[in-house]
Image (spheres, helix red, strand yellow):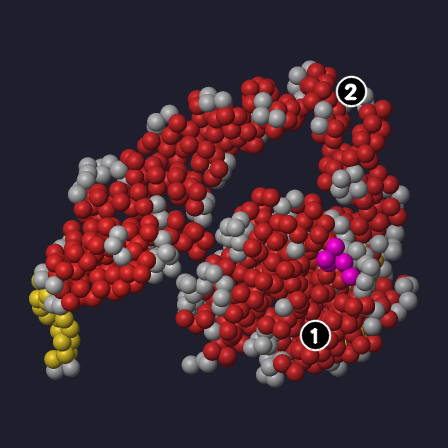
């Protein structure tokens, strides 16, 4: 049985290695670790732990949220949340498993959330595929709604700058990186029980360095400090961990041009891995027309455990596109002579160039690292290129991992750009690598598994390489399109608008209009920049009323100005030409709702759903329209579809609950209330329970009201009991109205002891009010509840109820039913309650009617 410390350490190293863990428990920490290992960063960043840390469900009234909105101080906000979480004083820590209260588990949870942010940032900017979660989505709703994205992005970029070096201004979702840095670097001191936090800290800092224009000395110092401090914490028995550590350390030195130091670490990595390799000469042919063999450089290599390396290639995987050479002279790869003809090779075991064994992925990473070192330690000339080619070729022989294979293809492209016969493939290969990022041909898990052990450039750096290649070939237009980020003029203009360079955008448009003065597209772009509807109208006219984009832009313009009639007309014109624009249908439906043209709205939202059945907002709006038309069953069904797609939306659940109770779907109303409480009670506390709906549910069950299917609601008694006890009163104990409804329910079940208990809890919920002795209204409220309790004592104290009792007989448990009195000393308990209340309020309210009534009731009991 693992101790807590050993268990946590096991999870930590699993995160470093990317190894899947055997599910031994269902605790939330292990689930979070599994999400990260599996590349499910969205799930990790939207789980309950992450929501608690980020305050995703905080209200606008919280001081931290107010400060964030006023100052955009993300560092202060995240740091305050971390302190509250680690100390256990953060609101919403109620549902954690028992071990989550352990400091070590909280530290690991925090580390996991930071890793999820860091890897999400890498997925967006380095590896792909696309990630459909914005960093703002993990923050409180009010921040997402009111924060200016441009201002927040500028703030983030400023915070990620270092030593006067600015972060690349078009880096996507930099907030992920900043949050991970705040958690790992700014709050480094909280990870007192963890062994790997420094590893992830330096990774975050190195990612920060890689988005800067140039190297930053302060980051270099910190990275080395953390990496050196980490070495003593590495487990002595796991060679894979040591291999990864030294590869990463060596790549850090390589990045900062400390090549001798990087080579030392690569050698240490090779030793810990047991990887054997050497570069030799072997006879072979490189061209189609060679009549004799010449010496060729060759890497011969073997991993320490050939069985593992064979397994890695046993499953066929999708791979990045490997562009073929297709040259009329050069062969695709060198044709080596048979081993028998090799004089210098045959003395070595397993060195047949025609039949080399597969390599472990980590060893392939190490080969590519040695290849990079060759480039930095030798001048850039033909001999260096020939020295590097064998490293890349050896990795390309055995494609085992998407990103490692990508890195090898990239290095080959760089090497081949120097030669006339290979430069074409070099450009085409770069283009293929640029195109591969958004494609979901490989999982995020596979792409991330060895990312930190290769020095893969970011997306924009590879695109820049492609642009430079085009420029070197004289393909200026293609190069310019890439340097301006995108290929089409519309996208170029949009980029300038996002950068708040509207004048530059106007200049480009006017320049292009001189070339093509009747281009409706350019006039639409001019309208976008100047927000002038005349340009969109002119674009519509010169297109012969066929350029739908002009009408869509015009429709959006009028909608923002709340001229919903004109907006609907514009969208109608656009949708006649191209009806497949989901967003156009959606906005038209919203405009129709404002104009209370319900049939038009139903048609519009129905078309949205036809195009995209997964559009939860369309389902929700359609349900709302059905309600306006009093088509409640249709609304109920639409809300159900919306919930299927947006299960975490408490607003849709609330609407669903109202319509369910309205049409007599009592079972669904109970399910909705339970879900609403689960989603909202941390933030809203007792106000998350709609007392009116709860009372209707209690009445329906206790009075056996018929539901929509003509079944008596009393059959739902067990579900109502679970809702009251497990969902509501287990969390909310200070609402007297809820306890009164519980008492009503228990009275119906004739469980009189629980009735009395509910009345007592209702009294306790109000008797602790600090204004009891100063406010007469509060006093009257408490006194009335106290009188109800006394009446309950009188009515139920002498009642008898049946209760099960467990007895041990001959080492076996038996259950017997016995009859007990609800409260034998009920009169004494009632008098004690009244005496206590009378005594507490004597100085303030003596001789008032309510106070006298309490004394009269006490006298009657006596």
Residue 495 visible, this angle: no
Q: Is residue 297 magenta?
A: no
Query: Callout 1 environment at 10 Å: few (<14), some (14 to 19), or many (20+)?
Result: some
Residue 497 visible, this angle: yes
Earlier in the chain: of badge 2 and badge 1, it is: 1
Question: What residue does disc 2 label?
Answer: 518
In the image, farthest residue toward the front: 847
Given residues 783 and 431, the one toward you in this image is 783
Label 2 SS: loop
Above or below, 735 relative to 663: below
Of circles 2 and 1, the one toward us is 1
Given residues 653 and 799, the one toward you in this image is 799
Query: Callout 2 environment at 10 Å: few (<14), some (14 to 19), or many (20+)?
Result: some
User: Over which residues does the magenta segment extend?
Assistant: 158-162
Above or below, 711 relative to 298: above
Question: What residue does disc 1 label?
Answer: 226
Given residues 282 and 15, the one toward you in this image is 15
Q: Position of residue 357 (x, y in %)?
A: 65, 71
Q: Residue at x 63, y 60 (%)?
A: 76
Q: Position of residue 356 (x, y in %)?
A: 68, 70
Using the image, tell me which numbered label, if any, was put on residue 33. none
Quadrant in which the N terminus appears: bottom left
Residue 370 appears left or right of 586: right
Q: Residue at x 80, y 42 (%)?
A: 484
Classify residue 414 by image quadrant: bottom right
Residue 648 appears left or right of 484: left
Quadrant in which the C terminus appears: bottom left
């Amino acid at each position: 049985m693992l101790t807590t410390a050993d268990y946590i350490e096991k999870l930590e190293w699993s995160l470093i290695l990317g190894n899947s863990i055997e599910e031994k428990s269902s605790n939330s920490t292990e689930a979070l670790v599994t999400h990260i290992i599996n590349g499910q960063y969205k799930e990790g960043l939207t789980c309950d732990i992450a929501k608690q840390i980020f305050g995703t469900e905080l209200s606008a009234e919280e001081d931290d949220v107010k400060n964030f909105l006023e100052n955009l101080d993300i560092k202060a906000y995240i740091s305050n949340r971390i302190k509250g979480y680690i100390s256990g004083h953060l609101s919403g820590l109620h549902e954690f498993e028992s071990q989550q209260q352990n400091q070590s588990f909280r530290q690991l949870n925090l580390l996991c959330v930071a890793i999820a942010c860091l890897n999400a940032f890498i997925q967006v900017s380095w590896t792909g595929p696309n990630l459909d979660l914005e960093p703002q989505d993990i923050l409180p709703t009010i921040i997402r709604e009111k924060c200016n994205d441009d201002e927040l992005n500028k703030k983030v970029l400023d915070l990620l700058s270092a030593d006067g070096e600015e972060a690349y201004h078009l880096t996507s979702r930099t907030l992920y990186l900043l949050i991970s840095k705040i958690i790992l670097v700014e709050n480094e001191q909280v990870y007192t029980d963890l062994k790997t936090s420094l590893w992830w800290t330096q990774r975050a800092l190195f990612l920060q360095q890689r988005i800067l224009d140039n190297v930053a000395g302060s980051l270099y110092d910190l990275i080395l400090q953390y990496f050196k401090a980490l070495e003593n914490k590495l487990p002595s028995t796991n060679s894979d961990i040591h291999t990864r550590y030294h590869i990463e350390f060596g790549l850090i030195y390589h990045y900062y041009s400390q090549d001798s130091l990087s080579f030392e670490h690569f050698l240490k990595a090779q030793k810990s891995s047991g990887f054997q390799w050497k570069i030799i000469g072997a006879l072979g042919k490189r061209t189609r027309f060679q009549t004799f063999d010449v010496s060729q450089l060759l890497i011969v290599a073997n991993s320490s455990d050939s069985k593992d390396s064979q397994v890695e290639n046993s499953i066929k995987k999708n791979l990045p596109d490997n562009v073929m050479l297709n040259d009329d002279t050069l062969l695709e790869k060198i044709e080596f002579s048979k081993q028998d003809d090799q004089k210098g090779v045959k003395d070595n075991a397993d060195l047949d160039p025609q039949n080399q064994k597969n390599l472990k992925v980590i060893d392939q990473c190490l080969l590519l690292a040695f290849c990079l070192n060759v480039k930095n330690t030798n001048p850039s000339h033909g001999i260096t290129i020939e020295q590097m080619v064998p490293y890349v070729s050896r990795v390309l022989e055995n494609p085992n991992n998407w990103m490692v294979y990508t890195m090898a293809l990239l290095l080959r492209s760089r090497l081949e750009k120097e030669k006339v016969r290979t430069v074409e493939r070099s450009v085409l290969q770069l283009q293929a690598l640029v195109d591969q990022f958004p494609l979901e041909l490989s999982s995020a898990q596979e792409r991330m598994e060895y990312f930190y052990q290769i020095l893969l450039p970011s997306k924009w750096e590879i695109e820049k390489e492609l642009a430079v290649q085009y420029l070197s070939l004289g393909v200026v237009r293609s190069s310019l399109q890439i340097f301006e980020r995108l290929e089409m003029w519309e996208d170029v203009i949009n980029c300038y608008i996002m950068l708040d360079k509207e004048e530059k955008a106007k200049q480009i448009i006017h320049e292009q209009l001189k070339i093509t003065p009747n281009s409706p597209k350019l006039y639409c772009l001019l309208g976008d920049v100047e927000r002038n509807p005349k340009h969109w109208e002119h674009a519509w006219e010169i297109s012969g009323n066929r350029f739908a984009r002009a009408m869509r832009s015009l429709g959006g313009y009028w909608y923002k100005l709340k001229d919903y009639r004109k907006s609907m007309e514009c969208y109608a014109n656009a949708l006649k030409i191209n009806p497949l624009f989901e967003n156009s249908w959606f906005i038209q439906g919203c405009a129709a709702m404002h104009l209370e043209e319900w049939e038009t709205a139903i048609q519009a939202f129905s078309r949205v759903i036809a195009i995209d059945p997964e559009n939860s907002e369309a389902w929700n709006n359609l349900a709302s329209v059905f309600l306006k038309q009093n088509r409640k069953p249709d609304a109920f069904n639409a809300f159900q579809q919306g919930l299927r797609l947006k299960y975490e939306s408490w607003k849709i659940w609330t609407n669903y609950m109202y319509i369910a109770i309205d049409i007599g779907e009592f079972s669904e109303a109970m399910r909705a209330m339970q879900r609403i409480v689960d989603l909202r009670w941390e933030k809203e506390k007792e106000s998350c329970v709609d007392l009116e709906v709860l009372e209707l549910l209690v009445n329906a069950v206790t009075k056996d009201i018929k539901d929509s299917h003509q079944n008596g609601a009393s059959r739902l008694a067990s579900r109502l009991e679970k809702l009251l006890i497990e969902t509501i009163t287990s969390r909310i104990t200070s609402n007297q109205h809820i306890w009164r409804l519980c008492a009503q329910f228990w009275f119906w079940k004739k469980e009189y002891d629980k009735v009395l208990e509910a009345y007592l809890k209702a009294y306790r919920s109000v008797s602790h009010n600090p204004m009891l002795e100063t406010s007469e209204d509060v006093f009257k409220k408490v006194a009335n509840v106290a009188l109800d309790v006394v009446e309950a004592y009188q009515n139920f104290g002498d009642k008898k109820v049946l209760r099960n009792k467990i007895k041990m007989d001959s080492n076996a448990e038996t259950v017997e039913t016995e009859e007990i009195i609800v409260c034998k000393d009920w009169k004494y308990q009632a008098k004690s309650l009244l005496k206590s209340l009378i005594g507490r309020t004597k100085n303030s309210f003596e001789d008032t009617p309510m106070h006298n009534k309490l004394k009269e009731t006490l006298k009657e009991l006596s």
